Image: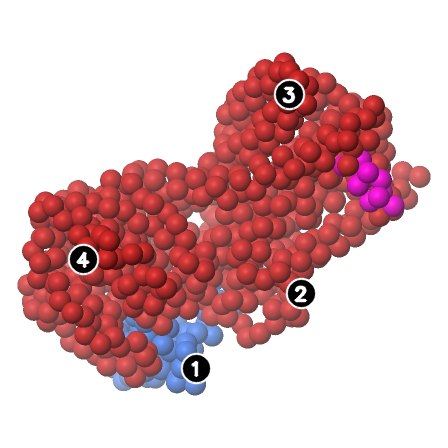
Amino acid sequence: MSTKQKKLNELSQNEAARVCGFFENNKAMVVKLREIGFAEGDEVEILGRGLLGGTPISVRLNQTVIALRTREAALVKVESGA
Amino acid sequence: MNRSSDEQVLHLALVGAPNTGKTTLFNGLTGGRAKTANYPGVTVERRTGQFRTPAGHTVELVDLPGIYGLAGRTLDERVAVDAITGKIEGESAPDLLLIFLDACSLRTHLHSVLELKALGRPSVLVLNMIDLAKRDGMEIDVKALEKALDIPVIPTNAARASGREALINRIDDILDQTRQHPGPAQTTISPSVLKSLQIEARKIADTVIVKEAGMNVLTRRLDGLFLHPLIGPIILASILFFMFQAVYSWANAPMDLIDHGFSQLYGLAKQIQPAWLASFLGDGVIAGLGSVLIFLPQITILFGFILLLESSGYMGRAAFLMDELMRRAGLNGRAFIPLLSSFACAVPGIMATRTIESERDRLTTIMVAPLMTCSARLPVYTLIIAAFIPRENVWIFNQQGLVMFGLYLAGVFSALVVAFVLRKTATKGETQPFLMELPSYKLPQWRDFLLGLWQRIWVFLRRAGTIIFTVAIILWFLASFPHSDEGIRGSFAGMIGNVLLPIFKPIGFRLETVIALVPGMAAREVVVAAMGTVYALQGNEDQVAQSLSHILQNAWTLPSALAFLAWYVYAPQCFATIAMVRRETNSLRWTLFMVGYLFALAYLAAFVTYHIAMYFTG
């Protein structure tokens, strides 16, 4: 299977992917995303989305669950099909 | 704190991510005997407790707010970081850090252990919930972890006494080993620093995790239900509905009991001579105490529910479900919890805003918290509705119930509008992020539950109680002096009422109503008792409420009554709330702004209601 880079919020539900980087245009937010646990190589999977506008989203990050808005999720680069 | 005088006492700080079991262990070690105080200059609670190690060392524990790292943003988190790094005035850094890590999320959160360790303080890793990790199929090589981190690692079980013992058994060894000078603190946090910490942490995780587990199955299944876009909100609404039902139905009996008790005391006090003393004790002290304690049953039940929702892990899901709706109003999903508490009383609600990250979001939440219908408004609503709204059914709904529900909705709706307007004007700024870990679901521990409940009630009594009580005494004075044949009408309160009357006349309030609003400053529900006094009634509170309802039916018109209800949706008059807003915003301007806008909205709503009702009733 070939790998494909996209933003975390662009994954479809239950599509397996790994974090491969961050968009550094919002440094403060990247610090927070990293502190709560997002790091290169981590497994991510979208578990669910909110009713209004599909946000916020709940994401499985390794064994933990993180809730965040699509805006913040768009700062996380992921590789799907890896 | 003076460290030189208590050389023997060792200071331990519990640090780590939220929901890693810090408070459970704290309660276990200290036997629940905690002292709460505030950190100097800020209103964050500082929870400390003591215990004795087997070798006889006295250890003081401090339970710090949860942090993921040192880049703390919320008021709570900043205090935690300052406490660890010894930046709090008059307090040196702790002698030992007990760093908590949830074993299930070792891979995800290990880098924050490295970040804390890099501070150079003596540290111990408490690898908590190891039993739950094992149950999920995870295997960790603790010895290897200890070696890789070069600090002691103590695996503990969630909430079980055995977890505590593992720590107690090793604490003396650790204390002896770690009494050394700390190295230089590293506190600059940037994405690149974090990235290297994460790379190191993931490497360690790869070597120490013998067998990786999948995600907690129960949590995954429950989230499929609780976070379902359609079923999730329905479940949340049902939980809230049940909660409010419980608050109002379960609280009735104990409230009657408290009420009855205070009526008895009141009767006894009234027999005391001289008459002014009887009035002071009865109408001042006992009535003042009664107006604080009468809230206890409802507040206890509401806090109990909130604690259960928090400790089970559901509260984060509620914030998740509410986030988008609240974002559209300019708030944050995290504002849901403070606003929910405000339905009991705005005072604890405002205190709970400390977990909101952005100062603007926090301020906006504080400003709208008093619009949630607090339990003090209920006696007022009940009195007026019973007197003026017929007990008939509209379709299957009771008309009185509908009006009550409408008043609740009016408050919530106004809060959303006010928040929206504020975020476009006074608290304008970028949309703030929503980012939180959703903990795995857990059964609440009854011991933590009871201790937490007691702690919250105590804080409420201390904060709100003292203010309400003091104000009640002052207002008793205003309503009782100078003595005149006209009773309260000739008193200072009567005079103030007379001066204020022209302001309130256009919204249909009569002199009696305005006079009653003056003592009603203490707490909103005091207006009911005050109205009884104005209309010169005798007897206990139950009789007052009953006959008052008859008197009002004759003395007031329907438009006046409806205007009064509309006023109370916004009613700014609560000294405890005003004082709490002053404390928490640390700004007189914002406090005055809140009082001003609530007053303006109350006036406007009453004015519009009065005139529309006048038009329809001729």
Q: Viewer-nearest of labels 3 and 4? A: 3
Q: Determine the image quadrant of residue B208.
A: bottom left
The amino acid on which the numbered mark 3 sits, given as a three-letter code, is: Ala
Secondary element at image label 3: helix
As displayed, is residue B543 above or below residue A27?
Answer: above
Magenta span of residues: B493-502
Mark 4 or mark 2: name the one nearer the start of the chain. 4
The quadrant of the rendering that contains the C terminus of chain B is: top right
Label disc, if present, on residue B421 of the rendered structure? 2
Residue pointed to by mark 1: A26
- Residue closest to the eye, B377 or A82: B377
The amino acid on which the numbered mark 1 sits, given as a three-letter code, is: Asn
Residue pointed to by mark 4: B126
The amino acid on which the numbered mark 4 sits, given as a three-letter code, is: Val
Residue pointed to by mark 3: B278
Instruction: Report, in whole angstroms, how far the alpha carbon at label 3 lies from the one at label 1.
Output: 67 Å
Pointer 1 local density, CA inside 10 Å: few below 14, some 14–19, many at least 20: few
Q: Are marks 3 and 4 in contact (CB under 8 Å)?
A: no
For the question of whether residue B162 can be seen, the reply is yes
Mark 2 or mark 3: name the one nearer the start of the chain. 3
